[in-house]
Each structure stands twice: as structure tokens, then as C-alpha cells.
Image (spheres, grey):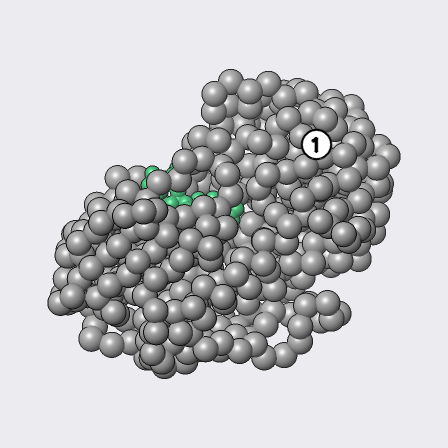
Amino acid sequence: MDRIRLRGGGPLEGTIPISGAKNAALPLMIASLLTDETLTLENVPRLRDVQQLFHILANHGTDWSVEGKRAGQNDMTGQTVHLCARAIVDTTAPYELVSTMRASFWVIGPLVARMGVARVSLPGGCAIGTRPVDFFIQGLEQLGAEIEIDQGYAIARAPNGLVGARIDLPRVSVGATHTLLMAAALAKGETLITNAAREPEVVDLANCLIAMGAKIEGAGTSEISIQGVERLRGARHRVLPDRIETGTYAMAVAMTGGDVTLEHARGDLLTAPLAILERAGAEISETNRGIRIRRNGAGIAAVDVETDPFPGFPTDLQAQFMALMTTAKGTSHITETIFENRFMHVQELARLGANIHLDGQVATIEGVERLRGAPVMATDLRASVSLVIAGLVAEGETTINRVYHLDRGFERLEDKLGRCGADIERISG
Ligand code: EPZ
């Protein structure tokens, strides 16, 4: 299993190209199941989760191909992917394929909408909470599907097609919004989703569906209305830049000091985290190339943060921000409101010398003078990268085990940081 070895050092200087967003690419790829024509996606990141989803979609009968360069080459531009589900040959998404990635459960929406039946293994994914699927099931039932849970599978049936309905989501759910949006696009009549997720990735999916012929209004607000259509067609769509990757590198620069341009990044996708970073002492500006982040030697101030659905501070940046706060001047509090078990990085950061006290959903971080390198291990994607951020300033050597978590969501992380002066390498095997 690969490891990452880091030696804490000086500031980061240079340019980091920001990839297409993983959490937009995944639902966009799944949307290809809604049509028998080709969906072409540009700027798809080279990630393990994307690769895994190719396998899942292929199992349903999707033909896919990738244009251009492959991972391992120097080119940092995203890949262009063609997906064509001309005929759905299998409406089952089996456990072996679905268990490692929660987003693969989302195929249930397009499959039942187009084929009238879907049998999808209940999901796995990052171990950050119980992550039930009750909103998906209730929502699909409201659209007229019959749902049965049998031997670890959710089976949805709607032999006469789905019918538009009003769906009030009990709380904001990104995945349920994506799934119900896709299902409602092919339902008969009008659907209204209230308390919908407002995340930019939902807007990206809606824009792609509109290009495919769907009639959708209100994406990006908490009320989305969808007028179902009989069929959708192929389209070409560019995946938006990854706001979590952007925020992660912005925090890395805030941590080490330096001056880095995050190329292709869009500030409007992460207003809340950038405002917090400014309060902590980073200088941020938008340029025609992306976002420039600078910090001089003055150090970082402690700032309190609470995670919230978009446009709030994203839970997917909580671990990274905690790493930053470990060496801030003073005491900060981080409250996690989205997932009940998303503090697994705390004990690993403590191994590097961080002083963190956990009380339920609130972490209190007393900034320390310095961190010291150690072997660490993380159990989810964003937790792993928080250890990279800490390792960038820790004295001596930090080894991060189980790098496959990082490979699920960060494209060529060690290359991108290495080019900006970080002392970082991947050790294979
Ligand atoms: C998406 O997960 C993201 N994943 C997550 O990113 C992200 O942390 C999360 O949204 C919140 O922003 C992808 O986009 C692939 P939710 P999702 O449904 O859709 C509860 C990463 O690191 N809930 O918005 O699975 C749920 O348990 C990943 O890239 C129910 O109770 O999250 C959670 O507490 C990790 N019942 C809350 O809602 C349901 O049926 C929000 O989850 C569905 C959700």
C-alpha cells in the first residue's frame, strides 16, 4: 500500500492547477444513464472514485471512453469523457461495486426513472457517520416508486413510470437532491423539491440536465421545480472546478506561509471558507488566473467555525481547517453539524503534537508552537489530507499511511505540492 512521506519545511510558492470537482463529476457521470445518447464531460478529474464509477456504469451497459492524456503524464488538464448508455443491460448495482463509494447509490434515481426498476446495494463510503438513505427512499416513493429493502439491496419499482410530486426533504441532503432531480427529470408532470441542497455541484448537475433537455428551475436555491420530459438527449458539459481541493490548498498555504495561485479556482464557490481564512490572517485575491493566496511570517489567528450546508462552511473542509488551527495563536472551536462521526483526524493530529479536546460535536483546539512529524494513518479522504497539511509544517518526517483514501479525491497531490516547494514523496508498495 502506498504511503506519503513529508518533511516539514518552508513556505509554498508557485501555481497549483485546480482539477474538476469530484463531487460534481460523479453525479454528472451518473446522469448519463438517463439518455440513450452520448454525454460528453470535460474537465473530469483523474481519481479512484471516478474510475470506480466507470466500472459501475459499465456494468449497467454504459460504453465509456476517455480522450487525451492519461494519469502519470505531466499534463495537468482534466480528461474529456464520453459516456453512452444506449441500452441499459442490467438494472442491478451489486454490492461488490457499490460498497466502496456512497455516491454510487445515486444510480437508483436514473435507473428507476428510465427503466422502471432498479436494484441497488445499500451504500458504503467514508466512515464519517451512519449516512442513511431514508430521504432517497421517501422521495422516490413520493414520485410513485414502490421500494423494498431485501438482503442489503434497495429495490425500486415503477413499471408505469414515475409521477411528479412535491418532496419536502427533512434536512438538506446533497445526494438526495441529486438523485431526486435526475429521477424527476423523466417523471410525468411537475416535481417540487423543497429544502433542496444549494451546493454548486447541484447547480452543475442541473445545468447539464438542462443541456440534455430537462426543464428545471431554481437550482442553487432551496426550491427546485422540475417539469418532467419524455426523453433526454446527449450533451456536452464542462465540470466545474473543485471548491474542496481549492480550499484545501488555500489552507495549506495559510499553514506554511508563501504565495500560491490556485489556477482555474472560482472564489464564488467558497466565499465562506475564504472569508474565514482572511480572518485567520491570509491575504486572498481573485485574479484572471484564479485565486491568489498569500501569508507572510505573521502567523495564523484562531477563528471559530461551524460547518453548514452551502453557502456555509463545508464539512469537507473541516478536517483541513482543524489542521490549520493546531498551530494558530490562541484557542479555536470547530463545530461539526453535518456528520456525527467526522472527527477521526483528531487523534492522528494529536500524534503530531496537536492539542485538541473533543466534546460531542465540538472540538476545542489550543494552538501549539510547533508540530512534530510522526507516522499517521487516516480513515477518510478529507481526514487524510488534513494530515498532509499538518505534515507540511511538522518538524522532521511525517509518514501518512493508507494513501488510497487521498487518491479517491485528490488528483496528483504530491506533484501539485512538490512543484510549490513542499518536500513530499510517494513511497509505493
Ligand atoms: C455529499 O455527501 C458529498 N459527497 C460529501 O463529500 C459531503 O460531505 C456531503 O455531501 C455534505 O456536503 C459527494 O458529493 C459524493 P448528504 P452526501 O446527503 O450526499 C443525512 C467527500 O469527502 N442524510 O448531504 O452523502 C446524512 O447522514 C464527501 O467528498 C440522512 O439522514 O451527504 C448527513 O448527516 C464525504 N438521510 C446529512 O444528511 C438520507 O437519506 C447530509 O448528508 C441522506 C442524508
Image side of residue 424 versus residue 63, left or right: right
Q: Can residue 296 be seen from the camera position used here?
A: no
Name the residue at 76% across, 52% down: 429
Nearer-the-camera pick, 299 or 193 = 193
Residue position marked by numbered label 1 in the rendering: 300
Residue 156 rendering spot, x and y as whole percentages: 24, 56
Residue 387 visible to an observer of this rendering? yes
Q: Secondary structure at mark 1?
A: loop
Among the 4 quarters of the image, the one containing residue 31: bottom left
Which corner quadrant of the image does residue 301 belong to? top right
Whether residue 368 is situated above or below residue 207 in the rendered picture: above
- The local crowd at label 1, few if under 14, some if 14 to 19, many if 20 or more residues have their Cα within 10 Å, is many
Provide residue 273's location: percent of width, then percent of height: 55, 42
Q: Residue at x 54, y 57 (%)?
A: 49
> Which one is in front, 427 or 249?
427
Reply above or below: 290 against 403. Answer: below
For image coordinates 78% across by 23% down, the residue present is: 369
Question: Which residue appears at 41% of the width and 48% of the height?
Answer: 123
> As rendered, which of 357 and 384 lies closer to the eye?
384
**Res 358 quadrant in image:** top right
x, y percent for residue 183: 26, 62
Residue type at mark 1? Ile
Q: Position of residue 396 (x, y in %)?
A: 86, 34
Left or right of 296 in this view: 248 = left
Compared to residue 17, the image places residue 154 above or below, namely above
| Ligand 1 quadrant in view | top left
Is the distance from the Cβ of mark 1 to the nearest ligand 1 atom less than 8 Å? Answer: no
Q: How many marks?
A: 1
